[in-house]
Image (cartoon, grey):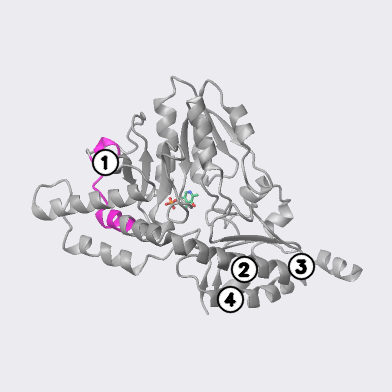
């Protein structure tokens, strides 16, 4: 059996999405900026997709800008606001558990004279609204808090954060890459000023993303060049990608009402199964304020990433943290931020489910995982001692 349990890293393109994209490679290949028929059709396709993306977050289409993905949108939001609001101040607030597209951009801005406050999180991965309020200063120009965490699945109190930022007159950006297409989003009700998303996290293609920018926000172009995207993001439009992200988001949103409870049921079955079958295991992240498809667990007395290799041999594809950090031996910054000691952070496993996940796969994992953990623990001298004491 092959079980793909790494949907937070990327997702498979849905066949309906690929089908919608295909005509834009060979038949409708025109440049949307040209005036002849095939180009005008492409321009229409881009505008249809813009509306599909806008509808998904309850925004107006003219406030959606296509980018090359989540990382570009995050970079644009932070560097753009830092640049255009520097006369107001040079202070930015974010969290300790952001994706590296945010954290490394903040570190870069620090080298350019900006000051960044990294809000801590509690043991569930939630920021404190009081700490956020206390951190906002007269020179604060931007608050950037992720909608949902890519490692532990915790969903932040976005509407409350938006209300605080609105009251204090500070711009609010959210990296919603893990949330769009997975949980309901309403940029007006939640007072979100800017929002990043990425197509390949909801069954669209890789290399296409979008940013929502509320009307009236000053932000310079991130890519200078032609007049595409209302002069805010130059470059000939990635028409197949744009059509793909539009179709993917429309499908995801239309199926959300059934998909959320289906995934939550599978998620809870997997969590309960792991915690009851495997001693010395714990769930990371909030049990309730959690992405429907996210499971993140830690196993004591397990070294490093060996668990991933043994799972791989059984056809189970998972991750030990974020895909971007694996390959390095440092424990995940997110697991350290929720207070896990280094050794527990090392023995952690992220299993993320999605549209294609079936219940049989949960059963298969619950059959294969416990003996793998037991086998690895048998190599641990510490576990040997604990077992002998019993
Ligand atoms: C995947 C991811 C990104 C990066 O998106 P890309 O489209 O791969 O550049 C940013 N933020 C979060 C939370 C993510 O999960």
Which disc number belongs to residue 313? Answer: 4
Mark 4 vs mark 2, CA separation in Å: 20 Å
Q: Quadrant of residue 223?
A: top left
The residue depicted at 31 percent of the width and 55 percent of the height is: 246
Q: Is residue 232 magenta?
A: yes
Query: For the view shown, which residue lies furthest in the bottom direction?
Result: 1
Q: Nearer the viewer, mark 2 or mark 1?
A: 2
N-term-proximal mark, 2 vs 3: 2
The residue depicted at 72 percent of the width and 72 percent of the height is: 277
Which disc number belongs to residue 279? Answer: 3
Mark 2 vs mark 1, CA separation in Å: 43 Å
Q: Position of residue 184 (x, y in %)?
A: 45, 51
Asked which secondary structure carries label 1, the reply is: helix
Circles 4 and 2: CB atoms closer than 8 Å: no
Q: Position of residue 92 (x, y in %)?
A: 52, 30
| Left or right: 34, with 287 as reference point | left
Q: Nearer the viewer, mark 2 or mark 3?
A: 2
**372 in relation to 46, above or below:** below
The residue depicted at 16 percent of the width and 45 percent of the height is: 33
Q: Nearer the viewer, mark 4 or mark 3?
A: 3
Q: Label 1, on which residue? A: 229
Give the crowd class for mark 2: few <14, some 14-19, many >=20 residues within 10 Å. Answer: many
Q: Nearer the viewer, mark 4 or mark 2?
A: 2
**380 in relation to 224, above or below:** below
Asked which secondary structure carries label 4, the reply is: helix
N-term-proximal mark, 3 vs 1: 1
Q: In this picture, which residue range is highlighted in magenta?
A: 228-245
């Amino acid at each position: 059996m092959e079980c793909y349990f790494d949907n937070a890293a990327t997702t498979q393109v849905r066949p309906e999405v690929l089908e919608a994209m295909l005509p834009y490679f060979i038949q409708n290949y025109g440049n949307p900026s040209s005036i002849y028929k095939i180009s005008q059709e492409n321009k229409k396709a881009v505008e249809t997709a813009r509306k599909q993306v806008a509808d998904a977050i309850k925004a107006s289409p003219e406030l959606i800008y296509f980018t090359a993905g989540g990382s570009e949108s995050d970079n644009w939001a932070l560097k753009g606001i830092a640049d255009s609001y520097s006369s107001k101040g040079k202070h930015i607030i974010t969290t300790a558990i952001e994706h590296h597209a945010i954290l490394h951009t903040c570190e870069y801005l620090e080298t350019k004279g900006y000051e960044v406050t990294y809000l801590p999180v509690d043991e569930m991965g939630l920021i404190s609204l009081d700490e956020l309020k206390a951190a906002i200063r007269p020179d604060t120009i931007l608050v950037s808090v992720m909608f949902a965490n890519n490692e532990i699945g915790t969903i932040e109190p976005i509407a409350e954060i938006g209300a605080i930022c609105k009251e204090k007159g500070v711009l609010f950006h959210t990296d919603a890459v893990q949330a769009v297409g997975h949980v309901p989003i309403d940029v007006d009700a939640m007072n979100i000023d800017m929002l990043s998303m990425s197509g390949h996290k909801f069954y669209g293609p890789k290399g296409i993303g979008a940013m929502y920018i509320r009307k009236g926000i000053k932000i310079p172009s991130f890519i200078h060049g032609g007049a595409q995207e209302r002069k805010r993001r130059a470059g000939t439009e990635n028409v197949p990608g744009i059509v793909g992200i539009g179709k993917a988001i429309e499908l995801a949103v239309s199926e959300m009402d059934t998909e959320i409870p289906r995934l939550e049921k599978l998620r809870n079955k997997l969590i309960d199964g792991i915690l009851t079958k495997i001693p010395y295991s714990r769930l990371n992240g909030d049990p309730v304020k959690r992405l429907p498809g996210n499971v993140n667990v830690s196993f004591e007395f397990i070294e490093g990433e060996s668990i991933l290799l043994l799972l791989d041999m059984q056809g189970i594809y998972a991750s030990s943290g974020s895909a971007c950090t694996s390959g390095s031996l440092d424990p995940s910054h997110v697991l350290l931020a929720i207070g896990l000691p280094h050794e527990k952070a090392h023995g952690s496993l992220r299993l993320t489910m999605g549209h294609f996940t079936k219940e049989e796969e949960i059963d298969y994992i619950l059959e294969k995982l416990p003996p793998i953990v037991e086998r690895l623990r048998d190599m641990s001298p510490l576990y040997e001692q604990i077992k002998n004491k019993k």
